[in-house]
Image (cartoon, rainbow, N blue to C red):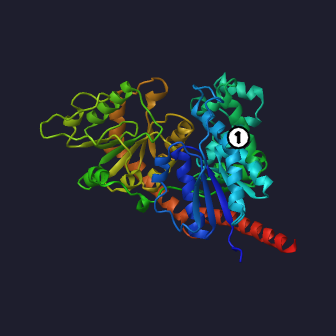
């Protein structure tokens, strides 16, 4: 007897920023709707991926398939942007994805294919197998508006934005200043420009767009996408805000050493007194900037946990001889001087559990959307330090629209953010009354996020609409099969 529940296939492009929200979407389809879910993963770091696959719900319903790695060394310039490399990698993976879908079809044909931003070319496979096709934007609606709208503007408006530095005016949405605009738009001669414009054109060809946001977070932008007289004439298809999709705290399993060093230390700190510092798995700073950051944290005289995923080695601590082994990318004696109020962790750390800890009072972040959402759902105000991709847009939203973050003002004019600026920002969040106001606003957003995810909440209902579409499609498949 055939299953009466749909089978949904999800495709995740390389990078934890793409994999994590896709995994969480798959879990939600299983837990809330009892769907069969297959997640196809295009990954370059198998160990990191496997760390995210522990404790998945109901293995009978959720299956993760790693697609074979592809060699793109002869297809892209070694100096090409990471976005270009990911897009080419996804393109070269299409034959393996098609074969994998054929293989799964022998058990239960997928009813729908959900691809992330860089997997839009896979929608042709969905058409071939008569599947519903959705694009999942793991970022926010404002980012989607810029991505979908930019390919539609004429050369004059493009030149005004790029050359004359005028804001990009998006119908019904907040304009995008040039200093915040996506790097992919800046150079028409770069391959990433051509590829990114293609993505913007392909997104509206889906049956719908899922977004990692919620109604109350971006009401104006979402409304614009639904009006054909506004941005809706570009997006064209239904948009489904289903967020926030973040890692649940209970599913993080740190090793005993990390737990003892970080979470155990946090247990001893006062409430909302610690600044958490992390630039994500892909964020890097120059050695000079690392030194300035270290001095800024020290000068602030506030407690901190600094996670540096790019460093290597064991957890740093002062030994019995007073020789702290400070790495060469930090000021001499930094660990000794700050041993009573700070930790430096040169490896992965359980971010979801750290941000949920009551001693955390702020988050110095690169503004990746996953990290931003984890901070919001835990009610933690932020210091915005954007590095790449849409992070500058995210920083602007957090500071100017939502009022839950401060931004390093010198960042746009000075390649090195100086220690005095970092010190000032840390104190604004942890010590000053201004931080209390941001903390209050982000806790309001925290409540709004939890409400959206609750039963009959806006995001719950939005995903339910997608689920009903899949169920209707399955019934059509079954009826067609019985009539054949």
Q: Position of residue 350 (x, y in %)?
A: 38, 52
Q: Residue, x 62% and y 62% (percent of image)?
A: 37
Using the image as rendered, state which of residue 383 and residue 28 is in the foreground. 28
Using the image as rendered, state which of residue 333 and residue 459 is in the foreground. 333
Q: Is residue 276 above or below residue 104?
A: above
Determine if residue 238 is in view: no
From the viewer's perspective, tell me whether residue 136 is left or right of residue 439: right
Q: Position of residue 53 (x, y in %)?
A: 49, 57
Q: Residue, x 76% and y 58% (percent of image)?
A: 131
Look at mark 1 in the image and give the residue it sits on.
199
Residue that protrudes farthest toward the right in the picture: 484
Q: Is residue 286 above or below residue 478?
A: above
Q: Position of residue 396 (x, y in %)?
A: 53, 39
Q: Residue, x 71% and y 51% (percent of image)?
A: 98
Determine if residue 334 is in view: yes
Q: Position of residue 325 (x, y in %)?
A: 22, 33
């Amino acid at each position: 007897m055939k299953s009466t529940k749909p089978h949904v296939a999800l495709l995740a492009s390389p990078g934890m920023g793409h994999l994590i929200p896709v995994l969480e979407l798959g879990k939600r389809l299983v837990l809330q709707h009892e769907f069969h879910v297959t997640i196809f993963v295009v990954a370059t770091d198998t160990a990191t991926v496997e760390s995210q696959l522990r404790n998945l719900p109901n293995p009978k319903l959720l299956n993760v398939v790693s697609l074979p790695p592809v060699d793109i060394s002869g297809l892209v310039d070694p100096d090409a942007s990471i976005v270009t490399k990911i897009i080419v990698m996804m393109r070269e993976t299409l034959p393996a994805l098609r074969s994998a879908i054929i293989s799964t079809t022998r058990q239960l044909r997928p009813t729908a294919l959900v691809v992330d931003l860089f997997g839009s070319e896979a929608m042709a496979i969905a058409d071939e197998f008569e599947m519903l096709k959705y694009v999942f934007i793991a970022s926010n609606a404002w980012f989607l508006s810029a991505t979908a709208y930019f390919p539609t503007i004429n050369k004059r408006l493009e030149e005004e934005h790029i050359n004359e530095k005028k804001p990009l005016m998006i119908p019904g949405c907040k304009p995008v200043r040039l200093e915040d605009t996506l790097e992919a738009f800046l150079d028409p001669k770069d391959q990433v420009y051509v590829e990114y414009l293609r993505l913007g054109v392909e997104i509206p060809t889906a049956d719908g767009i899922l977004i990692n946001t919620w109604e109350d977070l971006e009401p104006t932008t979402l409304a614009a996408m639904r009006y054909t007289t506004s941005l809706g004439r570009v997006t064209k298809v239904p948009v489904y805000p289903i967020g926030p999709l973040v890692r649940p705290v209970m599913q993080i399993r740190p090793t005993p050493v990390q737990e003892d060093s970080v979470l155990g230390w946090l247990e001893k700190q006062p409430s909302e007194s610690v600044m958490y510092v992390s630039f994500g798995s892909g964020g890097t700073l120059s050695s000079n900037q690392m030194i300035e950051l270290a001095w800024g944290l020290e000068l602030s005289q506030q407690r901190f946990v600094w996670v540096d995923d790019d460093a290597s080695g064991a957890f740093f601590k002062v030994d019995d001889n007073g020789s702290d082994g400070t790495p060469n990318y930090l000021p001499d004696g930094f660990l000794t001087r700050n041993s009573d109020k700070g930790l430096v962790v040169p490896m992965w750390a359980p971010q979801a559990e750290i941000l949920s800890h009551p001693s955390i009072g702020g988050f110095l972040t690169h503004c990746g959307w996953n990290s931003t959402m984890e901070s919001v759902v835990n009610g933690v105000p932020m210091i915005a330090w954007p590095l790449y991709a849409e992070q500058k847009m995210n920083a602007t939203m957090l500071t100017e629209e939502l009022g839950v973050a401060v931004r390093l003002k010198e960042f746009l004019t000075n390649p090195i953010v100086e220690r005095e600026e970092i010190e000032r920002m840390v104190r604004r969040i942890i010590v000053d009354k201004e931080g209390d106001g941001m903390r209050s606003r982000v806790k309001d957003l925290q409540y709004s996020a939890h409400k959206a995810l609750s039963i009959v909440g806006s995001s719950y209902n939005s995903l339910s609409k997608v689920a009903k579409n899949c169920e209707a499609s399955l019934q059509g498949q079954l009826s067609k099969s019985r009539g054949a």
